[in-house]
Image: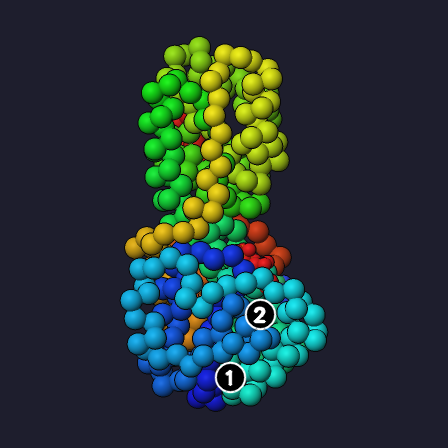
Amino acid sequence: MDNKISKIGVFTSGGDAPGMNAAIRATIRAAIYYNKEVYGIMRGYEGMIDNEIVKMGARSVGNILQRGGTILKTARSEMFRTKEGREKAYQNLKKCGIDALVAIGGDGSFTGLHKFYEEFNIPSICIPGTIDNDIAGTDYTIGFDTATNTAVEAIDRIRDTALSHNRLFFIEVMGRNSGYIAVNCGIAGGAVAVILPEETTSFDQLFTLLEKGGKTNKKSSLVVVAEGSKIGGASELAKMVAERSNYFDIKVTILGHMQRGGSPTYFDRVLASKMGVAAIEGLLAGKSDVMVGIRDNKMVYNEFNTIMTQTHEIDSEALRIAKILSI
Ligand code: ATP
């Protein structure tokens, strides 16, 4: 292991995701296990620029494993996109003696880290933390499992009220341009249709499906819509259906930020713990400018260029199953 590294900085960046705390804990404890000093950088790249850097110990991360959010806070930093901002961040790290970085965030955070590495040559590793599961090179990102479980629980509750009133519900879930959350919620929540950014179900096809449900005596229908849907969000689709037919009693629920909160599932806690340890072990083995991932249940390290030139394709088997089961 590379003993040239002595002080490691860790931070969370971009959108928050449940399980980030578990990743912070694992990173910090693994660094200490390998006799390295470790610092928490508050509010991602913003805190790096504003010099909000605190020394962490094994006990600083006690009792956070099960908590949602991130104790280090997170931010999106416009300043870090500028050369001047990154220079300021570098000077602050230098003052502290930080000679390696672990970022927990999405592909934007990894892009920032890559740029910083190219400019200042600080060994750095990214851990994928985002509910969207939209990053290539890993089967799962931290937070996806919890967010999907939260959405499914909400869908179950909506189903109770939908059934009582014979209603058609359009439920919008997060995921930005990825339909991972939507398709899995669709299957687990028994949706009549899932509308995804990756797939081109037309409005006519959707309407035909809903009409068929009406004719075959479906007591209620739930349509799960990914926020990045190309044919319209939940509100737009509901309006379009209402304009074409007055048969349906239509309601819309946009789940929104509640999907980001809450205690991480066991899966996210274990994933985050594995990724935190892998990040430190990777750094100490001389790896840099890579993102930790999990592929076929094994930890892997992905080069920046590999991640950025690929997309995490939607699970086609999940799509097929959602269609078969929606009759
Ligand atoms: P999420 O997927 O949850 O949105 P993310 O990490 O992709 O997370 P972004 O807002 O895209 O979130 O990126 C986080 C931060 O990374 C940005 O606010 C910015 O400070 C930095 N960053 C992103 N792209 C660049 C870039 N090209 N150059 C420098 N910094 C960047």
Ligand 1 is found in the corner quadrant, namely: bottom right
Q: Residue at x 56, y 65 (%)?
A: 110
The N terminus lies in quadrant: bottom left
Residue 48 visible in the displayed image: yes
Q: Where's residue 312, x and y in %?
A: 53, 50
The C terminus lies in quadrant: top left
Q: Is residue 217 above or below residue 271?
A: above
CA neighbours of label 2 inside 10 A, class few (<14), some (14 to 19), many (20+): many
Quadrant in the picture for residue 219: top left
Q: Residue at x 41, y 12 (%)?
A: 216
> Tag 2's secondary structure?
helix
User: Residue tagged by mark 2?
Assistant: 46
CA neighbours of label 1 inside 10 A, class few (<14), some (14 to 19), many (20+): many
User: Residue tagged by mark 1?
Assistant: 98
Q: CA distance from mark 1 to mark 2?
A: 16 Å
Q: Residue at x 40, y 69 (%)?
A: 24
The residue lying toward the viewer, choosing from 23 and 54, is 54
Name the image colouring: rainbow
Q: Where's residue 207, x and y in %?
A: 54, 19
Q: Where's residue 2, x and y in %?
A: 45, 85
Disc 2 C-beta below 8 A from ligand 1 = yes
User: In the shown orientation, is residue 84 left or right of residue 157?
Assistant: right
Quadrant in the picture for residue 118: bottom right
Residue type, mark 2 in image: Glu
Residue 290 visible in the displayed image: no
Residue type, mark 1 in image: Ile
Q: Residue at x 39, y 17 (%)?
A: 166
The answer to which of marks 1 and 2 sits earlier in the sequence is 2
Mark 1 vs mark 2: give the one in front: 2
> Tag 1's secondary structure?
loop
